Image (cartoon, rainbow, N blue to C red):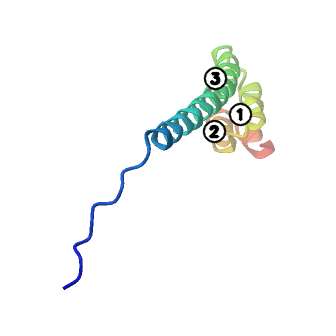
Amino acid sequence: MPEPVKDPIPDAPEAVAARAAAAARAASKLAAAAEESEEILDAADAAVQRALVVGDYRAAVGACVGAGRHADALVLAGANTRPLFSST
């Protein structure tokens, strides 16, 4: 008759702590990267907002294109005039 399988030995506390610390560092790096990208998006949003408040659709479209938001640029260009849409 074969011997019964014993429960595996649990991880050493040092290994568990090291994995937890590594996971915390990775989460911290991801959070920092997310904050940086949010700042960039906030600046782009602010530029578009300022242009729209004063009615400068051409500047708003330019800000969208500069931020890589091409779909937004096309929507704004189409909402204004045909020549602006055609030039976009």
Q: Earlier in the sequence, mark 3 or mark 2?
A: 3
> Which quadrant would residue 57 be assigned to in this image?
top right
Mark 3, mark 1: which one is toward the viewer? 3
Determine crowd level at label 2: few under 14, some 14-19, many 20+ residues with C-alpha closer than 10 A: some
Q: Are marks 3 and 1 in contact (CB under 8 Å)?
A: no
Three-letter code for the amino acid on which mark 1 is drawn: Cys
Q: Earlier in the sequence, mark 3 or mark 1?
A: 3
Element under disc 1: helix
Q: Which disc is residue 72 wearing?
A: 2
Mark 3, mark 2: which one is toward the viewer? 3
Q: Which disc is residue 64 wearing?
A: 1
The picture places residue 30, in percent across and down from the top left corner, at 59, 35
Q: Are marks 2 and 1 in contact (CB under 8 Å)?
A: yes
Determine crowd level at label 3: few under 14, some 14-19, many 20+ residues with C-alpha closer than 10 A: few
Q: Nearer the viewer, residue 51 or 27?
A: 27
The residue under label 3 is: 42
Determine crowd level at label 1: few under 14, some 14-19, many 20+ residues with C-alpha closer than 10 A: many
Instruction: Identify the residue shown where x is 72% and y is 21%.
Output: 56
* Quarter of the image that includes the C terminus: top right
Gap in angstroms between the C-alphas marked 3 and 1 = 12 Å
Q: Nearer the viewer, residue 17 or 82?
A: 17
